[in-house]
Image: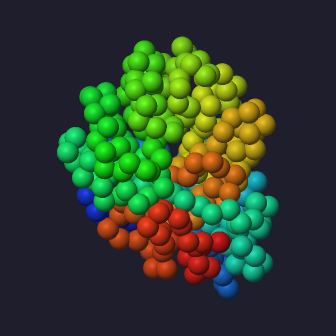
C-alpha cells in the first residue's frame, strides 16, 4: 500500500472568531492510501487546543509509514497512534479504501445505514450585536444555528440571533468562556429565548459544580470529552457529549465512544473542526447515531473539494458521492 500525506490550507469566507481564537484558514492534512487500484482519502484539522499543528500531524503519519504501507488495519492503527488528527486522517482513508474495495458504502460497513436525514447547524462566529442579527437573518432558513459567544454580553448576542432567526433551533457555544454561576444565572433567560443546547459553557476542570437537570437547557461536553475514559467523570455533569473525529482519532473510535455514551444514558452530538467535505463525510456516518449535528465546516470555507457535500437551504446534507468519500 502506498501512503501520501500533504498539508492544505482552505480559505475561509470570513474570519471565524470564537472565544479563544480567530481563524482565517482551515489548516488540514490530507492522507491518501493507494493499493494500485483504489485510493482511500482522509482529511483532518487536528485539535489545536491540544497543541496539534499540520507539522505535528504530518510527523505522526510519517512515524508509522512502514506499518501503514505494510497493510495496517483500523484496529492496529488505534494501537500505534494516539488520539488526534493524524490517526483520524489515516482511519478515514482506511474506511474509504475499504468502501471502494468492497463496493459498499461506509455507512453499511459501520452497521448504521444512512436512512436518517442529516441536517447540520450553521455557525455564527463572534461579532458585533448588529452583526449577529444580520447574520441570523441570512441564515433564518436553517433548521439549526450555532452561536459562538464569549463572556462579554452573551445574552444580547443570543437575543440578536433570535430576532434575526425566529424559528431556528439554537445552540449556544461559549468554548469554556463562562463559569458555573454564570451558566446558572443565564440559563432561564436563554431558555426563554428557546435555546436548545449549551455547548461547553464552562472551563474543562471547572465543571465540578455542574449538576444534571439544574440548567433548564441541556449542557453538552465538547472540550471536556475526547475518549471513553472521560465518560465516568462527565455523566453526572453533562446531558450531551459532542463527539468529533479529530478528538477521538477517527470514526472507528468515535463509533465506540458513541455506543458507550449511549449505554451510560448520555445524548449525542456530532461536531467538527473547520475543514473540507472529506473531513465531514465520515462524520455523517456517526451522525446516524446523533440527535444534534454540526458538520458545517465546508460552509465556512471559500473553497472545497471537487464533488463536495451539498447543503440545502435548511442545512440538510447530501450523501457524499462515491467520488468524494466512502
Identify which residue is drawn at 31% across, 50% down.
164
111 or 26, nearer to the observer: 111
Residue 213: which quarter of the image?
A: top right
Q: Position of residue 242 (x, y in %)?
A: 57, 42
Q: Position of residue 235 (x, y in %)?
A: 67, 26
> Is 227 located above or below residue 206 in the figure?
below
> Is 178 located above or below residue 16 in the figure?
above
Residue 42: which quarter of the image?
A: bottom right
Identify which residue is drawn at 48% across, 47% down.
169
Question: In this rendering, does residue 50 appear at all?
Answer: no
276 or 313, nearer to the observer: 313
Q: Quadrant of the C terminus?
A: bottom right
Question: In this rendering, does residue 135 appear at all?
Answer: yes
158 or 177, nearer to the observer: 158
- Say how the picture is coloured: rainbow
214 or 34, nearer to the observer: 214
Horizontally, is 308 left or right of 241 in the view? Answer: left
Q: Quadrant of the N terminus?
A: bottom right
Identify which residue is drawn at 69% across, 52% down.
289
Q: Where is residue 205 in the image (x, y as percent from the top left)?
A: 51, 21
Number of marks present in the image shown: 0
> Is 196 located above or below residue 112 in the figure?
above
Horizontally, is 112 left or right of 218 in the view? Answer: right
Identify which residue is drawn at 53% across, 49% down.
271
Amino acid at each position: 500500500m502506498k501512503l501520501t500525506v500533504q498539508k492544505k490550507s482552505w480559505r475561509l469566507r470570513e474570519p471565524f472568531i470564537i472565544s479563544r481564537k480567530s481563524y482565517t484558514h482551515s489548516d488540514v492534512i490530507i492522507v491518501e492510501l493507494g493499493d494500485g487500484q483504489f485510493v482511500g482519502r482522509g482529511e483532518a484539522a487536528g485539535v489545536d487546543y491540544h497543541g496539534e499543528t499540520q507539522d505535528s500531524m504530518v510527523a505522526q503519519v510519517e512515524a508509522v509509514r512502514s506499518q501503514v504501507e505494510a497493510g495496517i488495519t483500523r484496529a492496529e492503527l488505534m494501537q500505534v497512534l494516539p488520539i488526534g488528527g493524524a490517526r483520524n486522517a489515516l482511519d478515514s482513508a482506511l474506511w474509504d479504501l475499504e468502501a471502494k474495495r468492497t463496493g459498499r458504502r461506509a455507512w453499511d460497513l459501520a452497521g448504521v445505514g444512512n436512512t436518517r436525514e442529516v441536517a447540520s447547524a450553521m455557525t455564527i462566529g463572534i461579532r458585533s450585536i448588529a452583526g449577529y442579527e444580520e447574520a441570523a437573518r441570512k441564515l433564518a432558513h436553517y433548521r439549526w444555528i450555532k452561536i459562538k459567544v464569549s463572556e462579554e454580553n452573551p445574552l444580547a448576542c443570543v437575543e440578536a440571533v433570535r430576532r434575526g432567526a425566529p424559528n431556528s433551533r439554537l445552540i449556544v457555544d461559549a468554548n469554556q468562556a463562562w463559569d458555573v454561576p454564570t451558566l446558572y444565572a443565564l440559563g432561564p433567560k436563554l431558555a426563554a429565548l428557546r435555546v436548545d443546547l449549551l455547548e461547553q459553557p464552562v472551563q474543562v476542570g471547572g465543571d465540578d459544580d455542574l449538576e444534571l437537570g439544574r440548567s433548564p437547557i441541556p449542557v453538552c461536553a465538547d472540550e471536556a470529552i475526547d475518549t471513553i475514559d472521560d465518560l465516568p467523570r462527565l455523566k453526572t455533569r453533562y446531558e450531551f457529549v459532542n463527539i468529533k473525529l479529530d478528538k477521538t482519532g477517527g470514526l472507528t473510535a468515535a463509533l465506540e465512544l458513541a455506543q458507550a455514551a449511549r449505554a451510560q444514558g448520555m445524548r449525542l452530538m456530532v461536531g467538527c473542526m473547520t475543514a473540507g467535505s472529506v473531513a465531514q463525510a465520515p462524520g455523517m456516518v456517526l451522525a446516524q447515531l446523533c440527535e444534534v449535528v454540526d458538520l458545517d465546516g465546508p460552509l465556512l470555507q471559500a473553497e472545497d473539494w471537487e464533488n463536495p457535500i451539498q447543503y440545502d437551504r435548511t442545512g440538510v446534507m447530501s450523501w457524499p458521492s462515491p467520488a468524494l468519500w466512502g
